[in-house]
Image (tube, rainbow, N blue to C red):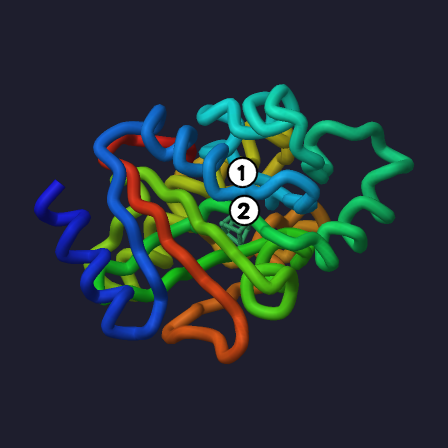
Amino acid sequence: MNKLIHVAEQFEKRGISARVFPSRSEALIALLETIKDGQTTAFGGSMTLQELGAYEALMNNGKNVLWHWRVSGEKVPKLLKDAMNADVYVSSSNAVIEDGRLLNIDGVGNRTAALFFGPPRVIIIAGKNKLAPDYSSALERIKTVACPKNAERLNRNLPCRLTGKCQDCRSPERICQVSVLIENNLNQRSLEVWLVNEELGF
Ligand code: SF4
C-alpha cells in the first residue's frame, strides 16, 4: 500500500487526482457509488474491468453502460463513437509510471483518444501489476507482457505472442498502432487514477 500511496502522491503533484484501494471489491463499490443515476458510462477495452465485473455490477445497479466488449460486431462502430460522448469514461492503463504518468498503446485508438479528448470525466483503474518505475520499463512491460497476452486473447499471429519479444512488426494484425503518454492534468477535464493493491488485468 505504501508504494501505491507514494505513486498516488506523484499523480496529485501533476494535478491528476488519485485514490488507493486495498482491494478490488472496494474499488468496485466506489465505482458504483460515484456513477450517478442518469449518467452514461463508457468503458474502454480492459481486462481489469472484466475481472472486476464492473459492467455487470453497474448494469445490475440500473446504470447505463456502453461497452463494445458486450455488443455484437455490427454495433461496435456506433458504440465506439457514442462512447466519446458519455458522461464518464472508465478504463485501465497499460502501464502506470511511478512518477505519475500513464502510458497506453491501442490498436484502434478509441480508448487512447477517450483518455485525453473524450468524456469530461475519466477514471483509470489499475492494479499494482501495472506499475513501472520509469518510461522505458513501462514500454517494456506493454510490449512484452500486455501485447503478447492481448495477442493471445485476440488469437493474432504476432511475433510478441510467439516469442515474448516485440519485433516492431509490420503485421496487418499488429495491435500497437498508437501510443499515448499522459503527463499532466488535462485542462477542463477530470482525470482520476484509482490504484488497487491487487493484480488486475494485464
Ligand atoms: S509491434 Fe508487433 S511484435 Fe511488437 S508488441 Fe506490437 S504487435 Fe507485438
| Pointers 1 and 2 in contact (C-beta within 8 Å) | yes
What residue is rendered at 27% in x and 28% in y? 23
Q: Residue furthest right?
A: 74
- Foreground residue, 28 or 198? 28
Inspect the image, locate mark 1, and give the three-letter code of the amino acid beneath it.
Ser
Label 1 and label 2: CA atoms lie apart by: 9 Å
Can you give x and y, in whole percent of width and height, for residue 125 in the image?
A: 41, 44
Q: In front here: 152 or 88?
A: 88
Task: Please say whether residue 177 is visible from this viewpoint.
Answer: yes
**Which residue is located at x 62 percent, y 20 percent?**
60
Q: Nearer the viewer, residue 61 or 167?
A: 61
Discs 1/2, front? 2
Q: Which residue is mark 2?
A: 90
Q: Secondary structure at mark 1?
A: loop
Residue identifier under label 1: 46
Q: Give the SS element for disc 2.
A: strand
Quadrant of the snapshot with the N terminus: top left
Asked which quadrant contains residue 101, the reply is bottom left
| Residue 136: image location, x then y, percent | 29, 64
Left or right position of 178 against 167: right
Tell me if residue 165 can be seen. no
Q: Position of residue 167 (x, y in %)?
A: 48, 53
